[in-house]
Image (cartoon, grey):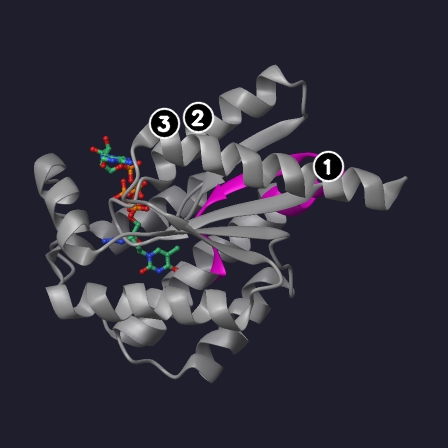
Amino acid sequence: MSGKLIVFEGIDGAGKSTQLSMLYQYLQQRGYNLMTTREPGGTPVGEEVRSILLNPLHGDLQHRAEAFLYAAARSQLVYQVIKPALREGKIVLCDRFVDSTMAYQGYGRGISRNFLQQINDLATGGLQADLVLVFDLPVEESFKRVNKRSTGDRLEQETHSFFQRVREGYLEIARQQCHNHLVMDASLSVEELQRQVRTVVDNFIDGKLRESD
Ligand code: Z5A
């Protein structure tokens, strides 16, 4: 099987990072050649851009400039890390990708989705995920989880209605791109959700292996 890109998406606190690291361990035990990464970040340059983006002191960051910064970090990640890993046949598990820009900057901030599509395409060279798991959680539950942790970064200071638009944006994207998107119920327990994630990913990998026979 050639490399595959599996992306974890969803609003803050939906449990993406938890599920991703559990899946990583599971797939590693099964002997797959894989790696994990995240957005924004995943490269030295991207991690520096991340610290600008999440810094609560940058409350004056303009919406378009914000979108360009996410795209810059993404482009660095795609060309420095993801494409080489895919060429080596790895399964890449990525915490957030282009849908985050559509959901947060598009549905959340109200930036033109055509414009965002253009900068996403430029940043990725048209690279698309093979499978996207969208972890869906009511905003109230997300707030409870994030407030417990309470880092209060720049985006976590947004309002309930902002995150509601982001959540609905994700569901709309998943409806429009149902060929490679699947919505997961992130309000389930960590263990039950992981059981479902493993089933989905096992089926996906088995299907790809059959295709390549
Ligand atoms: N952003 C953007 O606007 N545009 C873009 O293009 C991109 C990103 C790429 C990245 O911050 C921010 O950038 C993010 C979107 C924006 N916005 N904000 N705000 P980040 O990487 O720090 O944030 P995140 O990706 O949302 O991570 P997160 O908040 O840690 O969420 P998570 O990874 O989905 O959740 P978690 O860390 O696995 O779990 C969160 C807590 O919930 C933790 O205490 C867990 O123990 C608990 N948890 C997890 N699963 C469960 C279940 N099933 N039940 C109960 N409790 C659970």
Residues 200 and 24: in front is 200
Please tell me how many numbered marks the rendered image carries. 3
Q: Quadrant of the N terminus?
A: top right
Image height of 25 relative to 128, above or below: above
Disc 2 within 8 angstroms of ligand 1 (CB): no
Asked if residue 66 can be seen in this view, the reply is: no
Residues under labels 1 and 3: Cα distance? Answer: 22 Å
Residue at mark 1: 206
Q: Which residue is mark 2?
A: 22
Residue 54 percent across, percent down from the top left: 23, 51
Q: Is residue 105 left or right of residue 37?
A: left
Q: Secondary structure at mark 1?
A: helix
Q: CA distance from mark 1 to mark 2?
A: 19 Å
Q: Nearer the viewer, residue 15 or 90?
A: 15
Label 1 close to label 2 by CB (< 8 Å): no
**Residue position marked by numbered label 3 in the rendering:** 191
Residue 120 visible from this viewpoint: yes
- What's the residue at 48%, 83% (across, down)? 114
**Proximity of marks 3 and 2: CB atoms separated by less than 8 Å:** no
**Secondary-structure class at tag 2:** helix
Residue positioned 47% across, 37% down in the render: 196
Q: Quadrant of the C terminus?
A: top right
On the image, the x and y values in percent for residue 32 come to 67, 24
